[in-house]
Image (cartoon, rainbow, N blue to C red):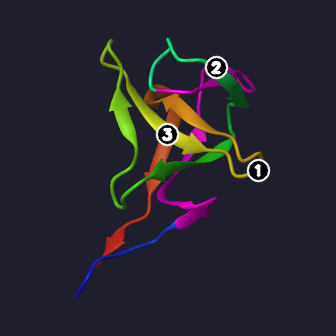
Amino acid sequence: MAAVVAQHSFGNETSHCRATLIGNEPNSRVTLRSGPGTNYKSLGYGLVGDRVLVLTVTAPEVDYEKDNQGKGWYRVGFPRSGAQGWIREDFLRVQCAPIND
């Protein structure tokens, strides 16, 4: 029997992972970037507590890359605004739906 993945839609993409933005200060800003690293352009920001979808090209893998300093980044989408970009993993609490057989 094939695996079934619980997925959430975001435009033409899907995700089986959601995340909440985290930080040291309530309502602090978390930068959304055009690529996986601080050298990429800032596209805007989310606030601590905002919820996002962790995007994927091929489920169940998520779009995750490490920058040249070894920091991990996830590609995310903000459901309310439609904004997409990359956020460093230490500013995200990621929760993925289980994969059912």
- Disc 3 to disc 2, C-alpha distance: 14 Å
**Amino acid, disc 2:** Ser
Q: Secondary structure at mark 3?
A: strand
Residue, x 50% and y 48% (percent of image)?
54
Q: Residues within 10 Å of mark 3 (few under 14, many from 20)?
A: many
Q: Nearer the N terminus, badge 3 or badge 2?
A: 2
Q: Secondary structure at mark 2?
A: strand
Q: Which residues are magenta?
A: 8-35
Q: Secondary structure at mark 1?
A: loop
Residue occupying the far left of the picture = 1
Query: What residue would you read off at disc 3?
Result: 75
| Residue toward you, 25 or 57 | 57
Query: What residue would you read off at disc 2?
Result: 42
Q: Quadrant of residue 8?
A: bottom right
Q: Is residue 3 above or below residue 9?
A: below
Q: Quadrant of residue 37?
A: top left
Q: Is residue 59 above or below residue 71?
A: below
